[in-house]
Structure formats: structure tokens, C-alpha cells
Amino acid sequence: MGIQPFLAILISLFGLCVGTYFLFSKMEYASWVIVSICILITSKTSESKRVSHLITIFNLKEFRKIRLLENLTIAFPFLIILIVYVEYTPIPLLLLASFLLSFYKAKKTTSFIIPTPFSKRPFEFTSGFRKQLITFIGIYALFGISIAVSNFNLGIFCLIAIYLTCFSFYSEPEDKLFVWIFNQSPKKFIFDKVKTSLRYSFLMTLPLIVSLLIICPHQYLVISTFSALGLLSIVTMVIAKYSSFPFKMNVPKGIIFSLGVCLPPLLLAIIPYFYSQARTNLKEIL
């Protein structure tokens, strides 16, 4: 992303501290959410190509040490958080998962095609859903817990998590060819992309929204507000992607997008700004 590594670490730790404070102040089972997040991040280090690359460089003994050190380094901040908040029960699971995942290697390919609730046309959602399947399973499982214990705040957290996961579908630009093949004007192309993103992100969150409305009908205003902000942020993300196309969204634009998500009124100015740049970029390709 072009961020100096030391600065990225500081930003990540700050975000972790703020997010942790929010979790423990709003959720009864925050410690288990923390462990789940840690396991999810740690599992990303077991990607097939990455593990194979390390094996070709180091002997088996060194490789095992490196993998274990990587996972324990990731787990260390989460371990400190659990200790600070006096949540000792999940610690053995955290350490055991970090140890076991150091031996795990994700499968490179599979003959089984994961079905999705989307058509083939919106490739972002089809491929993104398959890549983040475990994440979605974890979020829906966590949402099931929130319903079982009647924890409205945890349910809203899961709703936000779905939208954040959908953001990741648009983090990487596609090849120019996948834009060039559309015989459309830039305006029509962007409109179709936005329409598709709204339709399918709403489909992903619909079970959560309906469940929350049934369980807590008096909180309809809160549910509607977070849903609307999530959909509006998705629209901004799609347009922001093509404002930098064919390149990946740079750090300054990422900061502008983040400010808009944190301060929604700013989106009224940010969306037209990104849209103008997106139309200019797409004119050269479409």
C-alpha cells in the first residue's frame, strides 16, 4: 500500500486498541471475538504459495521455527489484550490455535466448486465470496450467538463485518480487458457496477437485518441507519476503485475513503470527487 512498515504497525496497533475497547464495552463475549479474529488473521499466513516458498528457502527445522514465530508474533498483541481485560479462559485456545496453524498449509486447488448465491456476471462477489467463505461462516456463526444470547450490539457488529468483508471484493483492480469488453459509456458502466454491488451486498446482509428486526423491532432506526451507511459506503468503494483504475487505490485515496466512512456527511463531497476521476479513467478504456 506504500505505507512505511513501522508506521503501518503503529496504525494497526492503534486500530486494534480502539476496536478492542469498543468490543469489550459493548459485547459480553468480546474475548471470543478477539480469539476468532486472531485465528482468522493467523490462518492467512498458511497460504499455499507462501508456505511452499518458505519451504524451498529453509530446511524443515528452520521452517518450523519461522512459522511458529510468525504465528506467535501475530497472537502476542491479542494475548496482551486478553490479559489486560482479565480474560484468561480463551488464552489456551489462542496459543493452541497459533501452534497448530504453524503446521497447516492451505490447499492450493480443489475440484469442488463452491456454490454462491450470485450469478457469474458480478465476478467481484462470486470470487470474493469463495475467497472469504470461512470469514462469512464465522460472521454468521457469531451472529447466531448474538441471537441466542439476545445481544443486539453483537448483531450490529456482525452486520458491519459483512459490509467490511464486501469492501475487500473491490480492493484489487481487474485486468483492463475485463472493462474493455463492456460496450458501454463510463456512466452506464459505473451505474451497473454500483447497482450490482448494492443488490448483492444487501442480499448478504438481508438475513441479519430481518433477524434483528424480528428480535429487536424497537431498534429499527439503528438497524436502518447502519444498513444505509453500509450500502452507501459500498457505493463509495466501487466508485473509488475505478477512480484509480487500472491501478490499485493509493494511500491518499484510501485515507479519503476511510474519512468518508467514519464521517458519512463527507460522502456527499467524496462520491462526486471519485466519480469524476472514475469517468475520466474509464473513457480511455471503454
Image (cartoon, grey):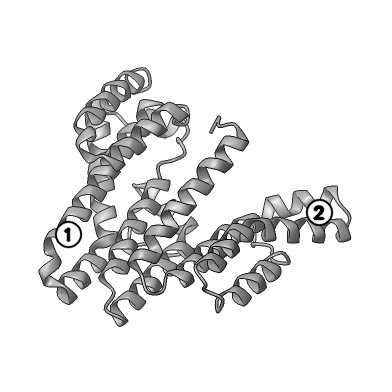
Q: Are marks 2 and 1 in contact (CB under 8 Å)?
A: no
Residue 250 seen in the figure: no
Q: Quadrant of residue 205?
A: bottom left
x and y percentages locating residue 29 in the rendered image: 41, 74
Numbered badge on residue 273: none
Identified by mark 2, the residue type is: Ile
Q: Looking at the image, tell me whether mark 2 or mark 1 is earlier in sequence order.
A: 2
x and y percentages locating residue 138 in the rendered image: 44, 68
Nearer the observer, disc 2 or disc 1?
Answer: 1
Identified by mark 1, the residue type is: Val
Q: Is residue 233 above or below residue 113?
A: above
Q: Is residue 125 above or below residue 215?
A: above
x and y percentages locating residue 122 in the rendered image: 34, 47
What residue is drawn where x is 57% and y is 65%?
A: 39
Question: Pointer 1: what residue?
Answer: 222
Categorize mark 2 by other alpha carbons within 10 Å: few (<14), some (14-19), many (20+): some
What residue is drawn where x is 64% and y is 55%?
A: 45
Left or right, 8 with reference to 264: right
**The one of 286 and 61 positioned closer to us in this rendering:** 61
Callout 2: helix, strand or loop? helix
What residue is drawn where x is 55% and y is 41%?
A: 10
**The one of 204 and 32 positioned closer to us in this rendering:** 32
- The residue positioned farthest toward the bottom in the image shown: 148
**The one of 94 and 116 positioned closer to us in this rendering:** 94
Callout 1: helix, strand or loop? helix
Question: Pointer 2: what residue?
Answer: 55
* Quadrant holding the C terminus: top left
